[in-house]
Structures are given as structure tokens and as C-alpha cells.
């Protein structure tokens, strides 16, 4: 009967595609408020927490480099269904966890799901929008991506704090959401008209054509620092809240992490208002402010400063990353744009993994607060260098 399909209203398909995107991304941050429970269960160190977290980023980078363009060939839906299958397998690993190996496998599968979704789902949401709706569709994709990342720790924190089976129920709920998402996806149309066999997909080689190089350095640096800040928030902030601030409510720790992702969504939306040329330096300034607030929170053990650092730093990350993405895409030759953007994403996801492991290594001899302060000093130097470069050589004003 007409009027019952997902495409019966102009924006319904786009919003449903965004909902599927959000469900997948929520699964990647679901374990965040649960790491303390896993530490109690399996008896591992803070370094192990950061390594378990960082395995996710290696999965994302591997997919981006090896099969980031697969959906252009075989279609969006097959790639997204594979991403949902990886998300479901990740949840099963966490549900079956009897030791560290299961956690590593779950995080790697979660990274594979995010890598499959990052480019394909963004393109799919935009292609499902009605004609003339590109700007709104971009906002839907951004909100689905970062909003989903924020919903993961919030959902897991609330369920772990107020419901039974804290290490099981969040993943059971996510499995149900993944199943519903697969059912929705199967009813949505394919948007790639000319499909090719999977064997035609080739790994994407990172590359930097000459016109991109002047803007890529500061753009990549700001992206690296912004993602590193997220990495620290999502891997060790629950432990800091518990150990230094005596905040053991997992719903609160999940909400603090969620705030950073929500603020990033707002920051990315604001780029349309302030413009690309100003969003990169403004994002760098906000990242510096967020890092300074985090340093103050570590030094004086004040919860309000942790919350402020999440909001300010998250907003700066959103401004800087969308500004970086827009500037790099505008400077890239059309035939090299995908490779350049893939390179930017690889640098950004390296920011999630490498500095976080460094914090874990230093947490042993220096303690969590000392390691956090060293991290903040290094990231502040990087983003200050990028900001100084942008002040001398601002990126061109692009719409």
C-alpha cells in the first residue's frame, strides 16, 4: 500500500539512513564507561585499557586504506550490511568475554564496522536526501556520526548504573538495535547505479598533491589533536573520575564523554556560520582552551572543569575537523580528492590511538594525572604550532 514505505516522505529515507549510521557508531563507544568493570573482572592495568581502546583505531585505519572506496564499486547497502555484521560480531565478543582476547577482538571488529561506515554511510545519507537538500543531508550525516558516538557511552553508562547485568545488557540492547537497523537498511534503496565486482576494488594509497601541501600540515595537526583529545576522554576519563574525583556513577562518566561528542556536532554545524577560513584557527583556539581546562581539572580535581573541557574541547574538535576536511577537499584536485581525504582520516585516527597508548605507558610511573599533564603539554604544543601557521597563512575562504 502506498505511503507505508520508507521513501513515502521526502526526508524519511535520509533520516532512516542517518539512524542506521548512528546505531553503528554508538556501538564503537559503548564500552567506554565499562572499562573499570572489566579491570575489576580481569585485573589489567591502565595501559591495557588504552591498548584495548586503541585497537579500534587500527581497525578503522586498515579499512580506510584497504577498502575505503568499496561502496563506490559494489554499492552502499552491501558495505553497510557488512559493517552492521561486524558491529553485531563485536557485541557478541563483549558478551562472551572471559579474558582480554575477547576485548581485543571486540574492539577490532568495532573498528572494522566504523571503517566500513565512515565513508559509505556519509555518502549514502547524502544520496538519500531529496534534490537540493545537500546541506541539510550533510548535517544529518554529521549529527548521526558524532551523535551516535556520544549516545554509546551515555546508553552504556545509564544501563550499567541503573539496570542489572552491566557487562551484558548494553551489548544485548545494541544487538537488538543492529538487527532493527539491518531490517531498515534492507528496505532502503541502493543509490549506486553502476556497480562493479568486488575484485575491482583496489587499496587507496595516501597521497598529497602539491596544491594540498600548504594547508594539509595545519589541518592534519588540528585533526590529530582533536581526535587525540577524544581518545583520552573515551579511554581514561572514567578512570580519572573514579580515582581522583571519587565519581563512581557510570551514568555520569558516560554523560561527560557524550558531552564531548555532542559539542563536536555543534562545532561542525557552526562551520557553516563562521566559514572554513575562520573555523580552523577558531577550532585550534578552542582546542587549546579545552586542553587548558583539562589540565586545570587534573591539577585541582574539579568535576566542573572536566565538564567544561569536554564541551569546549569537543566544540573545538568539531570546528577544526570540519574546517580541515573542507579546506583539504577544496585544495585537492578532483581526481585525487578521495586519496587526500583518506590520508587526513588516517592521520586523525592515528590521533585516537598513538597518544592514548602513550598516556597508558606513562600512567605507570607518573600516575594518571601526571600522564595526562604530559599529554596535554604535547598536544598543546602541536595545536599552537598549527594555529601560528594558520595566522600567518590562512586557508582560502571557501563556502
Image (cartoon, rainbow, N blue to C red):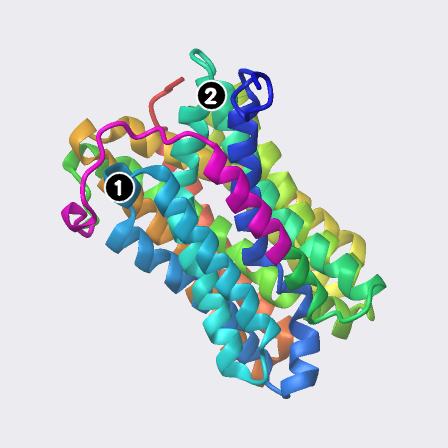
> Which of the two residues, 215 or 144, is positioned nearer the viewer here?
144
Tag shown at residue 101: none
Looking at the picture, does residue 220 appear above or below residue 38?
above
User: Mark 1 touching mark 2, by CB under 8 A?
Assistant: no
> Which of the two residues, 111 or 306, is positioned nearer the viewer here?
111
The magenta region covers: 175-203
Looking at the picture, does residue 68 appear above or below residue 366?
above
Between discs 1 and 2, the one toward the N terminus: 1
Looking at the picture, does residue 284 appear above or below residue 130?
below
Answer with left or right where residue 136 lies relative to residue 115: right
Q: Quadrant of the N terminus?
A: top right
Residue where numbered disc 2 is placed = 129
Asked whether residue 282 is in view, the answer is: no
- Specify the quadrant of the image occupied by residue 210: top left
Residue at 43% across, 35% down: 122
Residue at 62% across, 59% down: 30
Q: Is residue 297 magenta?
A: no
Residue where numbered disc 1 is placed = 74
- Place of residue 185 in the rendered image (x, y in percent of width and height, measured from the top left): 48, 39
Residue at 19% across, 32% down: 211
Amino acid at each position: 500500500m502506498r505511503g507505508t514505505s520508507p521513501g513515502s516522505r521526502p526526508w524519511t529515507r535520509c533520516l532512516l539512513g542517518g539512524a542506521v549510521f548512528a546505531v553503528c557508531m554508538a556501538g564503537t563507544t559503548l564500552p567506554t564507561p565499562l572499562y573499570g568493570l572489566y579491570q575489576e573482572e580481569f585485573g589489567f592495568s591502565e595501559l591495557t585499557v588504552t591498548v584495548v581502546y586503541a585497537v579500534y583505531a587500527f581497525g578503522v585505519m586498515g579499512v580506510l586504506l584497504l577498502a575505503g572506496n568499496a561502496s563506490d564499486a559494489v554499492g552502499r547497502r552491501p558495505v553497510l550490511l557488512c559493517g552492521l555484521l561486524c558491529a553485531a560480531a563485536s557485541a557478541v565478543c563483549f558478551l562472551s568475554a572471559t579474558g582480554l582476547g575477547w576485548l581485543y577482538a571486540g574492539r577490532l571488529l568495532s573498528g572494522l564496522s566504523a571503517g566500513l561506515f565512515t565513508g559509505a554511510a556519509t555518502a549514502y545519507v547524502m544520496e538519500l536526501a531529496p534534490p537540493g537538500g545537500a546541506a541539510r543531508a550533510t548535517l544529518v550525516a554529521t549529527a548521526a556520526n558524532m551523535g551516535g558516538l556520544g549516545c554509546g557511552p551515555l546508553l552504556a553508562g545509564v544501563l550499567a548504573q541503573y539496570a542489572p547485568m552491566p557487562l551484558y545488557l548494553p551489548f544485548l540492547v545494541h544487538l537488538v538495535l543492529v538487527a532493527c537497523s539491518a531490517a531498515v537498511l534492507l528496505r532502503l534503496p541502493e543509490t549506486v547505479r553502476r556497480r562493479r565486482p568486488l575484485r575491482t576494488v583496489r587499496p587507496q594509497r595516501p597521497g598529497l598533491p602539491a596544491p594540498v601541501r600548504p594547508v594539509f600540515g595545519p589541518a592534519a595537526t588540528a585533526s590529530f589533536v582533536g581526535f587525540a583529545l577524544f581518545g583520552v576522554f573515551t579511554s581514561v576519563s572514567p578512570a580519572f573520575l573514579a580515582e581522583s574525583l571519587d565519581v563512581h556513577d557510570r551514568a555520569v562518566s558516560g554523560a561527560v564523554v557524550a558531552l564531548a561528542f555532542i559539542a563536536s556536532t555543534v562545532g561542525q554545524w557552526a562551520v557553516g556560520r563562521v566559514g572554513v577560513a575562520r573555523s580552523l584557527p577558531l577550532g585550534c583556539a578552542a582546542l587549546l582552551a579545552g586542553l587548558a581546562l583539562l589540565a586545570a581539572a587534573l591539577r585541582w580535581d574539579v568535576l566542573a572543569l572536566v565538564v567544561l573541557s569536554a564541551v569546549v574541547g569537543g566544540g573545538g574538535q568539531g570546528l577544526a575537523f570540519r574546517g580541515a576536511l573542507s579546506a583539504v577537499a577544496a585544495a585537492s584536485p578532483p581526481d585525487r580528492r578521495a586519496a587526500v581525504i583518506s590520508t587526513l582520516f588516517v592521520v586523525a585516527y592515528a590521533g585516537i590511538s598513538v597518544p592514548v597508548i602513550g598516556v597508558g605507558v606513562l600512567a605507570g610511573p607518573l600516575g594518571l594525572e601526571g600522564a595526562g599533564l604530559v599529554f596535554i603539554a604535547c598536544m598543546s604544543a602541536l595545536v599552537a604550532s598549527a594555529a601560528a601557521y594558520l595566522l600567518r597563512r590562512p586557508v582560502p575562504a571557501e563556502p
